[in-house]
Amino acid sequence: MNSLRRYLEKIIDGSQTGIVAAIIRCILFLLSLFYSQLAKIRSILYQNNILKKKTADVPVISVGNITTGGTGKTPFTAFLAEQLKADYRIAIISRGYGASKDVEEPFLIKDRDQLYADAARAGDELFMLARRNDDLIFIRSASRYQGTKLAQEKGADLILLDDGFQHYQLKRQADIVLIDAEKPFSNNRVLPAGLLREPFAALKRADLFLINRSENVDFNRIKELKNSLNTLSPLNKGVFRAETRLESCVSVASQVQENLDFLKEKKVFAFSGIGSPEAFKKSIESAGARVVSYRIFKDHYNYQKEDLLTLLDQYSASQADLILTTEKDAVKLFDFADMIGELPFYFLKISLAIENREELLEIIRAQIKNGRAK
């Protein structure tokens, strides 16, 4: 499955050549035209009130993106919640990607310091946020509107939608769209010929943009991206820049934290099941470690006991000094702490450093207070 995914990615980015690749690329392009038209029709139906939008009784802020894969939505949602929780009782609502289907939604994941679900039922990203943050409400709900009802019952007066840009049904005070600085729009084509979830015209709905992982590109590239976003969304209220910062290495079994110097000159066996695996590899190398082997799983992969046994065998064969994964992957491995035992098995904890963060927060606060739900 991983080899097929990588093959398709090479077809999409044009690096795979040959007659077969050209034929597949042509088929994907035709399918993307069909998908793009469906997305446009859906947008028009909501814009013209043929499909009805619903309004929550409290302000709603959406954090999303226009491409598939990781752009840092979850760390940014965590940042927003931390900055705003002194003024609001916040609920974070997510679809819970990668979660099992055996719960009735909307499903309460956490209320204040009481955790009601594991990673399997919450989804990896939502569970990762929930275990790190108290005094917040976490809800899994494919219907974001139904999620807002439960959030209000629990006392929320502000709702953050994690990955909500394509969820037209619920009105919100602001749409914040994250863009990956290194690969902002893939090959500029809509799924499945590219990684765009919607045509570029959808960016007109965005109120704010955050260009993430800007440490990976030069200043001129950031300037070009800002100009492009301002052209695509001329009425937006700001384009901001963020960098991914490494915080620490944390033991999966014991939760003991080590500072980043711990990784210097270490040989690392890494694995991940995230939307941007190359970004994780670069993060490890930026901390001074050398990745001697890297196993990539599909995004939101649900690890089983057999997977962990295979990973431990691969780690042993790699002769690495330690095993390293992402926090998003690690939350699905806590149940295997006994198997991990005393092995040097860690996850990398990250955060965002946002340029002009106070200006960004001032705009968001103004949207919450004065913005009309749209």
Image: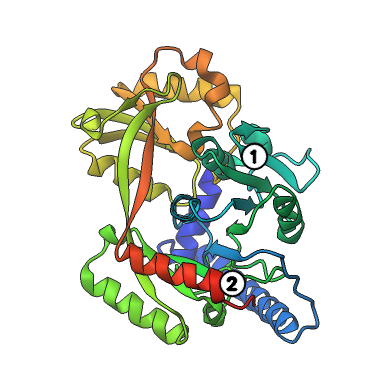
Task: Quadrant for residue 257, please give it.
Answer: top left
| Residue sitting at x 78%, y 39% | 103
Please tell me how crowded label 1 is: few (under 14), some (14-19), or many (20+) other residues with Cα within 10 Å: some
Q: Tell me residue 8's x, y (percent).
A: 52, 57
| Residue sitting at x 52%, y 74% | 189
* Image quadrant in which the C terminus is located: bottom right
Which kind of residue does numbered mark 2 sit on? Gln
- Is residue 346 depicted above or below 190 in this figure? above
- Is residue 49 depicted above or below 359 in this figure? below
Instruction: Answer yes or no: is residue 226 visible.
Output: yes
Q: Tell me residue 290's x, y (percent).
A: 24, 35
Which kind of residue does numbered mark 1 sit on? Asp
Q: Nearer the viewer, residue 71 or 207?
A: 207
How many numbered discs?
2
Q: Label for residue 275?
A: none
Report the residue marked by disc 1.
111
**How are the colours assigned in the image?**
rainbow
The CA distance from mark 2 to mark 1 is: 24 Å
Q: Nearer the viewer, residue 24 or 161?
A: 161
Q: Tell me residue 84's x, y (percent).
A: 48, 55
Which sits earlier in the primary sequence, circle 2 or circle 1? 1
| Residue sitting at x 55%, y 27% | 307
Report the residue marked by disc 2.
173
Task: Quadrant for residue 318, please give it.
Answer: top left
- Is residue 324 depicted above or below 224 in this figure? above
* Image quadrant in which the N terminus is located: top right
| Residue sitting at x 68%, y 77% | 34
Instruction: Answer yes or no: is residue 296 visible.
Output: no
Left/right of residue 365 with respect to residue 349 in the rendered view: right
- Determine the secondary structure under disc 2: loop
Please tell me how crowded label 2 is: few (under 14), some (14-19), or many (20+) other residues with Cα within 10 Å: many
Outermost residue toward the front in this view: 87
